[in-house]
Image (spheres, grey):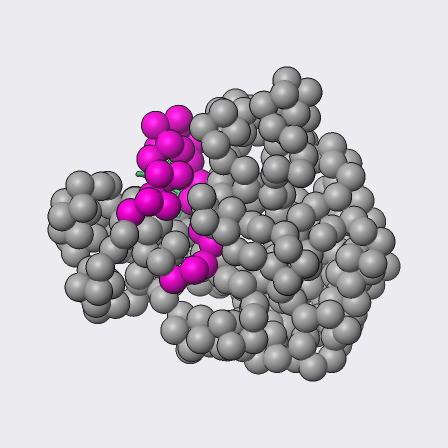
């Protein structure tokens, strides 16, 4: 395995398991199997609604002697309804209780926008908190408290652009150590990638396979896993399209969290760490069409005070 190495010596395995869209009811077995196959990095979030089952699987795996806590890297994320300063530590405490853990390895602010307590996805303007009502820097102060109280070993963000990262670095006490964003050959985010490299912020790539199993897809969405150039490169290396896409992420030194609930594909995805793409492959992959699968629209509708231009670097 390769790792992203943090300044305190901690190491995040470069390929982790995404748990978004892994239903409660199936995720327990998936986690147990993933641990048996060698996965040590698990990417979770409160809003995925499956942390209790994941926690039970982690606990049973540890009790069974399959793995020790210190060998695991567990990430989770603060939901948008807990952005007010006094809500951040309690939200992490809930996640820790659900996951049956004493600490996380990494806690991320899931999105740089806020809704009222108890709201999952806003249905009207009243459901939102404006940036003035819930300044992101206050949320970040709450994240710093999580770190100070040793509830998490690292703190970071998700879905943040250069402007937001710059603000947090300027106004915060601790810099974000990780930014988790959508990354794949259709969305390489070169500007953000270069910025994060320069600022020593690790990137984690979500939806690396194009998240074909999610609801609410745009019409005529391209199929990343069926891309012709990806197929050609895969044939050349004797690997699968998914492995080519994951190898692309690993070669850029970003961590990557493909989701699967299928044992064969779990195995296949972890094995991608050993595939070496060459310059010609990387050049071909850099020329593909550009497309963002998770466009953030659900957060900018229904009277939202947030705009897509606040979210993304265009
Ligand atoms: P499944 O869970 O049945 O394996 P993303 O990580 O971009 O969100 O993509 C997840 C989607 O990709 C799921 O539909 C998942 O299906 C599928 N998937 C995961 N690994 C592979 C693979 N190796 N080959 C093909 N599809 C895969």
Residue 275 placement (x, y as % from top left): 29, 47
Q: Is residue 191 visible?
A: yes
Q: Is residue 122 visible?
A: no
Q: Could you tell me which quadrant the N terminus lies in? A: top left
Q: Which residues are magenta?
A: 252-275
Residue lying furthest front:
9
Q: Residue at x 39, y 28 (%)?
A: 262
Quick check: 250 left or right of 284? right
Quick check: 44 left or right of 185? right
Residue 105 placement (x, y as % from top left): 67, 48
Residue lying furthest top:
64
| Image height of 12 relative to 49, above or below | below
Q: Quadrant of ligand 1?
A: top left
All told, the count of numbered labels is 0
Residue 102: name its quadrant.
Answer: top right
> In this orientation, which residue lies closer to the viewer: 254 or 113?
254
User: Is residue 136 on the magenta stretch?
Assistant: no
Q: Residue at x 61, y 76 (%)?
A: 164
User: Is residue 254 on the magenta stretch?
Assistant: yes
Residue 91 placement (x, y as % from top left): 77, 49
Residue 83: name its quadrant.
Answer: bottom right
Q: Residue at x 74, y 79 (%)?
A: 171
Residue 196 placement (x, y as % from top left): 51, 72
> In this orientation, which residue lies closer to the viewer: 39 or 83?
39
| Image height of 184 relative to 72, above or below | below
Q: Residue at x 68, y 71 (%)?
A: 175
Q: Could you tell me which quadrant the C terminus lies in? A: bottom left
Quick check: 286 left or right of 300? left
């Amino acid at each position: 395995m390769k790792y992203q190495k943090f300044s305190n010596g901690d190491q995040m395995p470069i390929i982790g398991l995404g748990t978004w869209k892994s239903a409660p009811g199936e995720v327990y077995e998936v986690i147990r199997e993933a641990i048996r196959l060698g996965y040590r990095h698990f990417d979770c979030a409160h809003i995925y609604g499956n942390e209790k089952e994941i926690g039970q699987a982690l606990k049973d795996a540890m009790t069974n002697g399959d793995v020790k806590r210190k060998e695991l890297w567990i990430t989770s994320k603060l939901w948008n309804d807990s952005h007010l300063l006094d809500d951040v530590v309690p939200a992490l405490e809930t996640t820790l209780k659900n996951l049956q853990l004493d600490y996380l390895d990494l806690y991320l602010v899931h999105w740089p926008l806020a809704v009222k307590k108890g709201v999952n996805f806003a249905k009207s303007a009243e459901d939102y908190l404006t940036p003035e009502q819930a300044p992101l820097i206050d949320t970040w102060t709450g994240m710093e408290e999580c770190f100070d109280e040793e509830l998490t070993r690292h703190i970071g963000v998700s879905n943040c652009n250069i402007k937001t990262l710059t603000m947090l670095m300027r106004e915060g006490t601790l810099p974000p150590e990780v930014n988790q964003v959508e990354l794949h050959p259709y969305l390489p985010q070169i500007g953000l990638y270069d910025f994060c490299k320069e600022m020593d912020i690790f990137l984690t790539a979500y939806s690396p396979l194009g998240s074909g199993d999610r609801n609410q897809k745009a019409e005529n969405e391209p199929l990343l896993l069926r891309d012709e150039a990806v197929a050609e490169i895969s044939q050349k290396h004797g690997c699968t399209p998914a492995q080519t896409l994951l190898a692309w992420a690993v070669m850029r030194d970003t961590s990557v969290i493909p989701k699967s609930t299928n044992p064969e594909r779990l195995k296949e995805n972890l094995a991608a760490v050993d595939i070496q793409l060459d310059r010609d492959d990387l050049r071909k992959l850099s020329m593909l069409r550009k497309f963002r699968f998770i466009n953030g629209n659900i957060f900018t509708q229904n009277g939202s005070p947030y705009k897509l231009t606040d979210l993304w670097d265009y």
